Amino acid sequence: MKLKLLLVLFLGLFIIQKPILAQEKQVVRVAISNQNFSTYEHQSVKLSSDDFIKIIDMSQKNQIDPVDANKIIEIRMENSLFNIYIDGDLKYENLNGPLLFGSNKELQILELNRKGTPAKYFGMLELRHSKNNIFFNIINVIDMQNYLRGVVSNEMPISFGLEALKAQSVAARNYVQNAQINQNYDVVDSTASQVYYGVNSYKDVADMAVYQTKGIYALYDEKPITALYFSTSTGITDDWEDIFGTGVYSGKYPYLKARYDLDNEPLKSERDVEKFLSQKDNGLDINSPKFRWEFEFDRGELEEVLHYTLQQQSKLGYVSPNYDGDIKIEGLKEIIAIKRTPAGKITELEIKSKTGNYKIKTQLAIRRVLKKNNAMMPSTAFFVIASKKEEALLNEGSDAGLLNIFDSEAEGRYPKTFKVVGGGFGHGVGMSQYGASALAKVGKRYPEILKHYYTDIKISTIPKIVEANEYNMGSKVEFYFEPEVYKEAYLYINNTRGVKEFPFKINDIEFSETAHIANKKVVKINITEYLRQGINIIDFPPLSYDNKGKHIIYRVEFENE
C-alpha cells in the first residue's frame, strides 16, 4: 500500500549521529524488603504457590525437579551458598545461585504481609547474592504493566478518579524507566522508590489506568522525563533547582518548573509566606488534609527532639556547626527561615538556643529535624510562632500566668511553646497528586494533567531505532489510543541517514511504498485514521542490508489540543 498521508518536514528534531537511546523497559526488577521495610538483605525466605514451582540454579543452568503445589520451600543462605528445604527436609544443598523460582500462579512469600494479607507476586522471584555473599536479595522479575498494577493504587488513592490515576500511571512508568539502583535490581518496593505490594494491591480502576496508558510516556527533548511527584501542593509547586540543586537529582531538569494555582504569585517576604499559608482556599489541593496544617511543641519537648535529630542530620553533613550531643540543646529561643524558595519552602533553617545556634540545609533534613510524634514535618513550607511575653500577659492577666509560660533563668526568659504553621505534603516538585485529582474532577484528561505539572513535555511513545542486523530483528511499539482523549496522533520518522525505503505496518495495514517520503530528513505523518480504540501496534521490519550502517528513528506523539 502506498502511503498517502499528511507529511510535515521538521528540521533539528533529531541529531544526525546515531544516538544512544534508552531501551524501553519491558521487564522490571524489584527488590523485596522485609516486613517493616528496613532492609533488602535476607538470609532465608519461605515460598509457596497454588501450582507447582519450577526452580533453576542459574549458575549451572540446571532446572531442579519441580516442587508440588502448596509445598513450603525454604531457602537459606549458609556459608555463602543456597540450601533448599522442602517441607522442612533438606533437598538441595550448596547451590551457587542465583536461584530462579517460577509458577503458573502467584508466588507467595510466607511470613511477609502486604496490605494485611500474605504477600503474593506475579512473574518470577530471583534470589541473588548481595552483601559479601552473606545475604541475598529477593527480586521480583515482573513485566512493566504488572509492576505498575502493583504500584499505582499504593501511590494514589483510587478515589482520585480514572484520569488522575492515568496521569499517575504515566509518571510511575517514567520513573521506573529511568531507574536502576544497582546491578541486582532497578527499584525497591518501598517509598525509597515507588511503593509496590505486588498482587495484593491490584485494583480494577488502577488496573484500567495502567492498561489505558500502555506504552505512553512523558518526553522532553525526546527522552523520558524524571517524573517526580508528591502528595499535596500548597498552591505553588517548586522549581527542581530550588529543592534539588545538588544531591540525588543533580542535573538539569527544565521540565520541573514552578506551577502556580489560581492567581498565586511568588512569595517574596516572610509576610507573604505567613499570609499565603494562613489562607485555606488558594489552591487545587484544598481537599487534602495536609493542604494546611499546624503543630505545637512545648519548648522542653522540642529541645529533646532536636537533641536526637540534630545529631542524626549532623552525621549526614546537613548541620553547621556539627552537633554531637555533648552539650544538649537548652533555652531554645528562635527558629528562623534563612533561605526560602519562591513557593515558600525553607531550604536553610537556623535554630537559636542558649547553648548554641545551628543551621540546617536541604528541605529533607529540615523536615527530619523538626519531628512531631516521631514523624517528620509534612513539608518545609511553614513559619514558626514562638510564645511571646505580651501574649502570656494577655492570656493570663498577671505575672503568675507569665511564669507558667516562661521559664525564669539567670540567662533570661525563653518561649514556652512553638507553633509551626504550614502547608503541603512532600518535596513539592513535579506533579501534585491531590492537584491531579482536582483537575480530573473538573474534566481534565490525563495529558492535560501531566502538561499542567511538567513544562513543555510531549505525550509520546519512546523513540526507537530501526536498522539492519544479522538477527533479522525489527522494531515494534505497542500503545493504547483513545480517540476521545487525543485530537491527533502523529508518527515521527527521523531519516537523517538517508535510508531509501522503510516499510512498516500500522495494525493490519501495510505501508510498503515509502520511497516518496524517504528523501525527507524528518517527517511527521498523521496516522489518526489508522488507529483504533485500544491497543495499537506499529511494526518496522529490519532495514535491508544495502542500508547497513544506517538507521531510522521513530516514535508516536499524541496531541490533545
Image: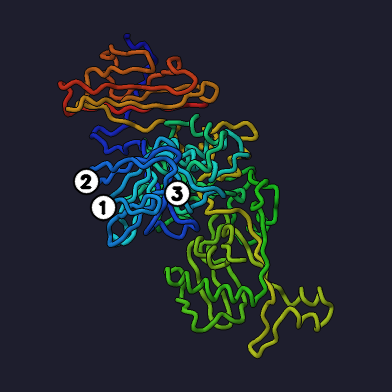
Seen as rendered, the residue at the extreme front is 89
Report if the CB atoms under discs 1 and 2 are less than 8 Å apart: yes
Q: CA distance from mark 2 to mark 3?
A: 25 Å
Residue designated by label 3? 109
Residue 481 on image: x %, y %: 47, 24
- N-terminal of the two: label 1 or label 2? 2
Vertical order, 10 against 380 (above or below): above
Q: Of residues 493 and 45, which is closer to you in this image?
A: 45
Residue designated by label 1? 95
Element at label 1: strand
* Quadrant (top left/top right/bottom left/bottom right) for the N terminus: top left
Amino acid under label 3? Answer: Ile
Residue designated by label 2? 60
User: Which label was assigned to residue 503?
Assistant: none
- N-terminal of the two: label 1 or label 3? 1
Q: Of residues 202 and 173, which is closer to you in this image?
A: 202
Residue 252 on image: x %, y %: 39, 49
Q: Is residue 558 visible?
A: yes
Amino acid under label 1? Answer: Leu
Apparent side of residue 453 relative to residue 78 in the rendered image (left or right): right
Q: Is residue 218 visible?
A: no
